[in-house]
Image: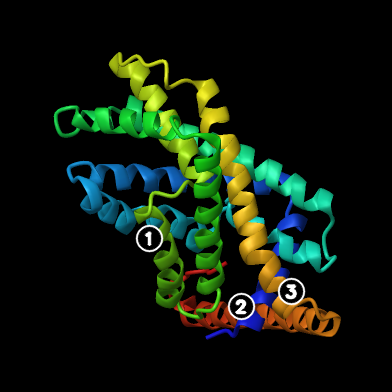
Amino acid sequence: MNSPLQIAQLCLYYGINKVNTPKVKTFILSIIGGFFVGAGAALSSICSYNFVGGYSQFYNGLVFPTGIMAVYCAGAELFTGNCLLIIPLLSRNISYLDMLLNWLIVFIGNFIGAILIALLIVYGHLPNMFEVNLAQTFFSIGIEKCSLNFGDAFIKGLLCNFYNCLGIWVSMGGKELRSIIFGLWTPIFLFAVCGLEHCVANMYYITAAIFTSYEYGVDSNKLNWGRLFYKNIIPVTLGNIIGGTGLVGAIYWYIYLSDEESKTVDLQKSNNNADSTIGELRNDLSTLNEINKQNNIKLN
């Protein structure tokens, strides 16, 4: 497995690559990321709705991480994880403008993806499952999240992204898919069971509740687009930023990369390792092309 120093080096390397990715590609990947997280959140609601108390939270925690695992295993962009861009920022490899522009693009893309999956689920009438009881569950989740006071939403957001970014950090220590998934799943399971607040997941939960109220004729003055932002998304996002940048990224940067020599030398090692991996994959594809020539199969 990778050492913590190597993980810090990888965060630096991947962070630089993120801000250098073309903005259109980043935006598309962000929509996909919001879609994935929304799908995982919807699945967690379906699997946990018929339970109460700790049992409901436990099943929610078991299933919710699937969306975030899809983001990092299949490839997408997620605002909460990109709070780790603080690492290349503190290393002076990117600028404040680079980081903030990436955050803005990814945040908007995530919101669009979350709204899209919410529309498909509600107007595809998945809430009709279980004799429409699921519709009430969707609506109740939205009401609960829009009833938090600013301080509670902020603190729950802070703790949530501490665990979320910790999951990303731990998963980068793995070199096999199973170890990566387990490293990512465990901290996310923890924050989901504890009922902490993830801004991208809430983009889905609350918009799904609003669409459910439209489609199923449920009216409430506690659930609307204005309350979505000022009662939840704004304080939760601020908490997510502080939790990811301050409690994970900045601390690990100080421990492992604040030394100028290690930060530059290790970054070069990361680059070499990544290039070596790509070279190995290309060699494997060339070998497979030779093997399959007789079948007229061409691998690209």
Residue 15 percent coordinates (x, y) = 71, 63
Task: Give SS at disc 2.
Answer: helix
Residue 188 percent coordinates (x, y) = 43, 60
Structural crowding at the residue carrying mark 3, measured as other residues with C-alpha within 10 Å and reported as few (<14), some (14–19) or many (≥20): few
Task: Specify which label sits upstream in the sequence, 2 or 1.
Answer: 1
Query: With respect to residue 181, does 125 lie above or below?
Result: above
Q: Quadrant of the C terminus?
A: bottom right
Farthest-out residue, left: 131
Q: Are marks 3 and 2 in contact (CB under 8 Å)?
A: no
Along the line of sight, which residue is nearer the eye, 26 or 108? Answer: 108
On the image, numbered disc 1 is attached to which residue?
189
Task: Give SS at disc 3.
Answer: helix
Residue 241 percent coordinates (x, y) = 64, 50
Q: Residue at x 58, y 50 (%)?
A: 240
Q: CA distance from mark 3 to mark 2?
A: 36 Å
Query: With respect to residue 272, does 69 lie above or below?
Result: above
Rendering quarter of residue 41: top left
Q: Amino acid at mark 1?
A: Phe
**Is residue 140 among what the camera can see?**
yes
In screen coordinates, is 7 left or right of 177? right
Q: Residue at x 60, y 36 (%)?
A: 234
Structural crowding at the residue carrying mark 1, measured as other residues with C-alpha within 10 Å and reported as few (<14), some (14–19) or many (≥20): many
On the image, numbered disc 3 is attached to which residue?
254
Q: Amino acid at mark 2?
A: Arg
Q: Amino acid at mark 3?
A: Tyr
Q: CA distance from mark 3 to mark 1?
A: 27 Å
Task: Judge depth for marks 3 and 2 and give the one in front.
Answer: 3
Along the line of sight, which residue is nearer the eye, 159 or 71? Answer: 159
Residue 271 percent coordinates (x, y) = 73, 78
Along the line of sight, which residue is nearer the eye, 244 or 94? Answer: 244
On the image, numbered disc 2 is attached to which residue?
282
